[in-house]
Each structure stands twice: as C-alpha cells, then as structure tokens.
Amino acid sequence: MVRTKRLPDIAETGYEFLKAEIHTGFTLAAIALDSEHEEKKERNRKNARVAYDTVVKTRGKVLLAPEQSKEISSQLKELRKKLEKLGEEFEAT
C-alpha cells in the first residue's frame, strides 16, 4: 500500500521539477534578453540553455498526465523561441 501511494508523489515531484526548471530557464532568458552587458547576457543565455536541455533530457523519465505533457511541451517551445532570439541553435527535430 505504501508503494502505490508513493508512485503519484514521485510523478508529481517530477512534474514540479520540470516546471521549476522551465521557470528558471524563462527567468534566465529574460535576464539575458534585457541585459546590456555581454558577459551577463552570455552567462544567463548559457544557463537558460542548460535548463532547457535538462528538461528535454529528463522529461522522458517522468510519468506525466496528458495535460501535464502538453503544458511542458508548450512551455519548452516558448523557452526555445527565447533561446533562439539569444542566438542559440538547435538541431532539427
């Protein structure tokens, strides 16, 4: 009985982690976009990309409900657009 109760908790924790990481990426990308200092812009761009890549690599290991998966995909798409504005390049998917 403990195991069946823990599974939803683990799934929810994974979902919350993905949301937090995307939020971090958005914050860092916004700082980079607003920055006039190249060093600060570059540092925050790189860290926003790390957040993006972490979500991409981790999301397949997290059990998501269909609506959660749709939300994460949508937010990743928006983060990717911000990163592209900052000069990031992505492989075709």
Image: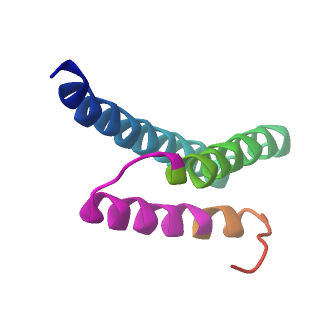
Pick the front one: 40 or 7: 7
**2 with respect to 74 (left or right):** left
Q: Where does residue 19 sit, x and y in percent of width and height?
A: 40, 44
**2 relative to 72 in the view: left or right:** left
Identify which residue is drawn at 67% across, 51% down. 53
Judged by its main secondary structure, the magenta piece is: helix
Answer above or below: position of 54 versus 64: above
Q: Is residue 82 above or below residue 24?
A: below
Extreme-right residue of the structure: 39
Residue situated in front as seen by the camera: 86 or 36: 86
Q: Quadrant of the N terminus?
A: top left
| Residue 86 is inside the magenta segment | no
Where, by quadrant of the figure, is residue 31 drawn? top right
Residue at image point 83% right, 46% down? 38
At a point 28% along the width and 65% down the height, the residue shown is 66
- Image quadrant holding the C terminus, namely bottom right
Q: Is residue 2 above or below residue 45?
A: above
Residue 80 x/y as whole percent:
61, 65
Point out residue 75 in the picture as x, y percentages from the top left corner.
44, 62
User: In the displayed image of the protein, which residue is found farthest to the bottom?
Assistant: 92
Q: Quadrant of residue 87?
A: bottom right
What range of the chain is rendered magenta?
Answer: 61-80
Q: Residue at x 77, y 63 (%)?
A: 88
> Is 48 on the left-hand or right-hand side of 64?
right
Magenta stretch encompasses residue 73: yes
